[in-house]
Image (cartoon, rainbow, N blue to C red):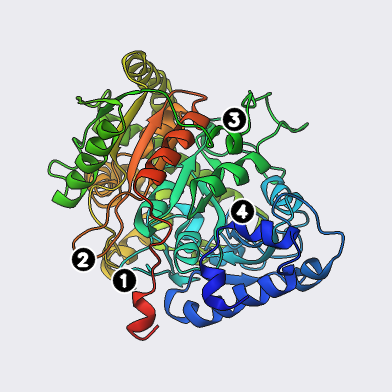
Amino acid sequence: MRPEEYLQHDATALAGLVRDGEVTPVELLALARARRDRVDARLNAVVGDVPDADARAADPALDGPFAGVPFLVKDLGQEYAGLPTTSGCRALQHEVADRHALVTQRFLDAGLVVFGKTNTPELGAKGVTESELLGPARNPWNPGHTPGGSSGGSGAAVAAGVVPAAGANDGGGSVRIPAACNGLVGLKLSRGLGPYGPQTGEVMFGMVTQGVVSRTVRDSAALLDAIIAPHSHADYLGAVPPERFADQVRRAPGRLRIGWSASSAITATPDPEAVAAVEGAAALLEELGHEVEEVAPPHDDEALARDFLTIWFAQVHGQVRDIKRRTGAGDRGFEADTLAMAELGRAGGVTSLLAALGRVPSYVHALADFHDRHDCFLTPTLARPPLLVHSTQTTQTLQRASRVVARVRAGKVLNASGVLDQLIADNLGWVPYTQLANLTGRPAISVPLHWTADGLPLGVQLVGRLGADGDLLQLAAQLEEARPWVQRYATAFERAGG
């Protein structure tokens, strides 16, 4: 197989070629590595090697629906036995996993050949992938821009053709934001479907889910089929879908009622490209026979953002404290922004956390009421096109101040300063639409229907009812058929010197 042929196949097609004996897993692994070597010096998407990949590719007993297909896992929450999972954090760079994460094991059980790990921001705590430890990942459509986060390395690697799909996870948009930034498909599963552990229980009270980013809907469907199943150490028994996603996406959906909006209290004026993206998607859905109307958002997204960040900061505080206990690391093991978030979480206290969690049912009910009238809620995935790399980086002065605040435990002063409002504007202002699905546990998918005048992807998001994951994939497949995107590859950066 020639390199240009490798780029033209999704994971499902490559697996078929392996089964038919037209290409071997060893050949595919060599092609994936060659592509990584060609592009990654510029993109910094792949940050670790898996030493047993060659032996796995050469194993004649390799089996599964994706046997022999090269794959990458995220360097956060997708542990690979014998290797460190840095999570973009200096304090974790030498902590080696004693066993695979359950999701990693299921990727391996599907026959995938995992040969590397992908870049992520520290502890996955940002919507851009720019850690001090691993360095910034860059967008293959234009390396001056971010590939999003926190699964930004996975998004960049897939969009650049290193692999046809890669592991990702989503706690506030971390599957959908990179999908939108890189021209890919990304589904956040319903709460309870994605596997977790054994390293941890459910993260952020079940708001984080495992998944993938891919170039095609059929790949996302079949890869998610491969990882969702009950497991004996789960806290509860999730309802596994009655039909395989891969079967469901082969059929067209019926006529759906879809409400769309680009409105956000956080981002008073979304970028015209974001508005164009959602209006174009709404028009296409109407052409396909669906009932489409513009609606008011079903929730107060500014209030939701405050509650989301309250929960998020409490989670970061717990993570930092646990990492310090396990590793003996001090504050220097963490970035200043992470310490500031952790201190805000500590200072907020259990009362603020419980109050935020207590308001989550109100968002669940508001969205459920919306879904009584509409099958899907359509929004832009991003309020602005992918940001410039380093555009959200805090100044050295503020970083020094954050370290002092963390050291003297002055989080209450920081809270009183109005820093939370600034954090909402800086970190969620360009991605105000994605957290709703995490807090409510609903499935949401980003599909690449729009490219800006500057040639950057800007996806649109569909949020479905609880358990409607397959319905969203089915609708995404219809959109993919109507407006194919798989032939659009991010190769301009190579011609510009990549």
Kindly indicate the quadrant of the structure image that contains residue 16.
bottom right
Cα separation between marks 1 and 3 = 36 Å
The relative height of residue 450 versus residue 27 in the rendered view (above or below) is: above
| 485 lies left or right of 470 | left
Q: Name the residue beneath numbered marker 3.
A: 192
Mark 3, residues whose alpha carbon is within 10 Å: few (<14), some, or many (≥20)? many
Q: Quadrant of the C terminus?
A: bottom left
Q: Secondary structure at mark 2?
A: loop
Near-viewer residue (285 or 403): 285
Cα separation between marks 2 and 1 = 9 Å
Residue mark closest to the camera, 1 vs 3:
1
Q: Earlier in the sequence, mark 4 or mark 1?
A: 4
**The disc labelled 2 sits on which kind of residue?**
Asp
Q: Name the residue beneath numbered marker 2.
A: 454
Residue mark closest to the camera, 4 vs 2:
4
**The disc labelled 1 sits on which kind of residue?**
Asn
Q: Earlier in the sequence, mark 2 or mark 1?
A: 1
Q: Which mark is residue 12?
A: 4
Cα separation between marks 4 and 3 = 26 Å
Cα separation between marks 4 and 1 = 28 Å
| 24 lies left or right of 428 | right
Q: Earlier in the sequence, mark 1 or mark 3?
A: 1
Which residue is outermost to the right?
A: 61
Q: Earlier in the sequence, mark 2 or mark 3?
A: 3
Residue 307 pos. (x, y %): 35, 32
Cα separation between marks 2 and 3 = 39 Å
Labels 1 & 3 near each other (Cβ < 8 A): no
Near-viewer residue (20 or 282): 20
Q: Earlier in the sequence, mark 4 or mark 3?
A: 4
Q: Quadrant of the N terminus?
A: bottom right
The relative height of residue 221 versus residue 87 in the rendered view (above or below) is: above
Q: Secondary structure at mark 1?
A: loop
